[in-house]
Image: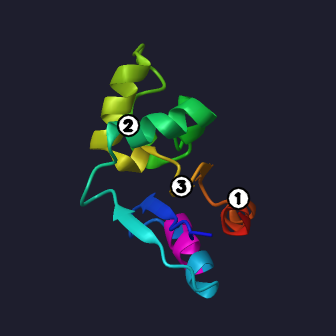
Amino acid sequence: MAEVQPQVFGTKKSKETRAAERFFKERRVKIHFVDLNERPIAKGELTRFVQKFGLNALLDLEGKAYERSNLAYLRTTEESVIARIIETPELLKLPLVRAGKVLTVGEDPAGWAQMLED
């Protein structure tokens, strides 16, 4: 059975992203870390998460970036919100983690554990 290497999309400053990194490291699972401040998430990749969870579930509605973006007050299309997220990863509830067909948003140790079971 081929091991699926989890992809962790996040930022170095995000404590939830660091929790994901720690979770996999403690289990000796090699991850592919994508720092969204250095490399924006691909639109297709982001779309996968949007299809599974819906756009609002991906947004960090409590975060300062969301507050500053005025997204709560703007009438905007999903397409333009996705474009905004790609430019401003702080709008996301981090980390986004994908391993095969299993996707998680935010700090989700149960979801991460599920990735290792398959």
| Magenta stretch, residue numbers | 16-22
Q: Residue at x 54, y 40 (%)?
A: 58
Residue that badge 2 annotates: 44
Crowding near pointer 2: few (<14 within 10 Å), some, many (20+)?
few
Q: Is residue 40 above or below residue 95?
A: above
Element type where label 3 sits in the image: strand
Q: Is residue 18 magenta?
A: yes
Q: Position of residue 28 (x, y in %)?
A: 58, 86
> Separation of disc 2 and disc 3 at Cα?
13 Å
Measuring 32% from the left and 33% from the top, which residue is drawn there? 84
Q: Amino acid at mark 1?
A: Gly
* Percent position of residue 88, x then y: 32, 44
Q: CA distance from mark 1 to mark 3?
A: 10 Å
Circle 1 residue: 111
Is 15 within the magenta?
Answer: no
Q: Position of residue 31 (x, y in %)?
A: 47, 72
Tag 3: amino acid? Arg
Determine which residue is flagged by label 3. Answer: 98
Q: Is 116 in front, or is 110?
A: 116
Quadrant of res 42 = top left
- Residue 55 numbered tag: none
